Amino acid sequence: MTAAADAGQAAELLATVPADQRVALVDPRFVGHVHALRLGLTDPRFDAAALPGALTARPAARGALLRALRRAVVAVGSGSPVVPGTGSAAGDRTVPGRLAVALDAEGTPVQRPELGSLTAAVPTGPDERAAAQASLAAVDDEAIRLRSAVKAHDGFFTTFFISPYSRYIARWCARRGLTPNQVTTASLITALIAAGSAATGTRGGYVAAGVLLLLSFVLDCTDGQLARYSLQYSTMGAWLDATFDRAKEYAYYAGLALGAARGGDDVWVLALGAMVLQACRHVVDFSFNEANHDAVSNTSPTAALSDRLDSVGWTVWARRMIVLPIGERWAMIAVLTALTTPRIVFYALLVGCALAACYTTAGRLLRSLTRKARRTDRAMRALADLADSGPLAQGVAAVLRRPKGGYTAPLLALVAGALMVAAAVFAPYGEWLVVGAAVLYALLAGLAVSRPLGGALDWLVPPAFRAAEYCAILALAARSDAPHAVPAAFGLVSAVAYHHYDTVYRIRGGTGAPPQWLVRAVGGHEGRTLVVAVLAALLTTGSGFTTALTVLAAAVALVVLVESIRFWVSSSAPAVHDEGELA
């Protein structure tokens, strides 16, 4: 920390700081809580941030800060604002406050964190200083720091059974120099050990698996709380937190299926069905949110009713629990694993997730049909990326155009998916009728995305494609006589689902979907569905179908994982921490 006598000297000092480092300007009269300074000056997610009397800039905003500071030297000396302004930002007449206004005016967004009861002030006289110091003494910033480490909106189980003590675990980790990524990795390892315990197929193994799964969830909550407590947000953390939850859950499903097989009960179809249902639920959530989060003139009586229900305490928790979020879901899985059998666990999962899917999808349909909103170009691009159309569908879209109409895209997608799944389930196994259905599916899928997805229900297109692909793979593997075909299909769907989750989190980070070469390399949803249909028709005897599915799963996993890891550890990845989804 270096003191500058005036704004001119501050500009000279800032110019000497290496360009790859963050810099901060703090008025020497500043009075405030340490955590207020942390929130304002150390959050890596924002290029520029400010609070009363303090301003910070990361390397991307350093140039704009220096330009503003040099322009401001004369204005600050004359006692006039840098630029005209209104509100609290313009009311901060300190050098950092005026520079923050200048940065905003130049087009560099300045984040101003919500401080709540934390004190951050620049008193100009003895009375103001005494008042600020009294406010400082009246508030325990460590208690606020602990409270703010917990997400504002979380599930019932997490809020009342995990967070009351996991926040203290987060503080313990912070004081010992542990990072959120290390805690996330520990959570993954614990979940994998839980899956291994379940795979033993013994009652003791199931009990241990349930306990370890709950412990893994405690660590899963702790990593995010540690990130918020210590403001350790990172690109790697965003990627790990976004993907490890799914990896842990699906690995645990596999462990349960292996344990059941040891006891003579084949539940692989149920395990894959639970994974498919859960993944499709998430795609519905992601697709709806991406389609509508920046909609223009967004109004809906259904949304207004939801807001009114949120004003009644008990309905908030009831509605959060009914969607079976991760806390409730993992608690149910853990308890049922310890007390019952894997088959009962999967039955409960399928029923619970199906009811939750019906509830959430019905609400989203009502909102979509009753809202009056214009979908933005960004939202339409996001839906097209989430559709995951490969070369076949893109080729069809290039030469054909779907009929105009507000509901033609979801109708085509739903019809295409229904025909594909029906053929996989009911057509004579091993005949080329399923391949013909896959070709028709690719044709209709291409038509569905041949125009921008701007209709009220066009957010249904990506979930329809996900359900069609996953369910077709499940049906063909389940009907095959090849040994271990369903476990191989489980691996394939896991790899494809990872690709789809990776797409979602890239879009959320504002960096767009994976590169087109990757989508083409893994075939797109229609290409993979056609390949699996052809393999099922060709390899009707022996273990060839299982081998082919295994090779396909390994190839898809290798390509998408290598590209995903390259992206998330690169400098182009967004420096955000995923707050997680209730579901």
Image (tube, rainbow, N blue to C red):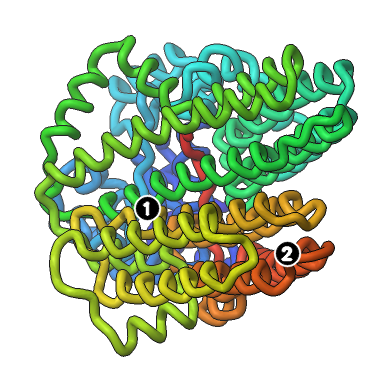
Q: Choose top left, top right, bottom left or bottom right for residue 394.
A: bottom left
Whether residue 192 is visible to the viewer of this picture, yes or no, is yes
Please state which amino acid type lies under the numbered disc 1.
Ser
Residue 376 in the image: above or below residue 228: below
Q: Residue 494's spot in the image, x, y percent? A: 66, 53
* Residue 13 coordinates in the image, percent (x, y): 52, 64
Compare residues 76 and 350 and report the one nearer the observer.
350
> How many numbered discs?
2
Residue at the image position 44 percent from the left and 56 percent from the top: 508
Q: Residue at x 15, y 55 (%)?
A: 296
Q: Which residue is mark 1?
A: 287
For the residue labelled by badge 2, is the local secondary structure a helix, a strand or a loop? Answer: helix
Q: Nearer the viewer, residue 512 or 433?
A: 433
Q: In the visual, does 153 lie left or right of 190?
A: left
* Residue indicated by mark 2: 549
Using the image, determine if residue 65 lies above or below residue 265: below
User: Dot 1 lies on which element?
Assistant: helix
Corner quadrant of residue 217: top right
Q: Position of residue 240 (x, y in %)?
A: 65, 49
- Between circles 2 and 1, the one closer to the viewer is 2
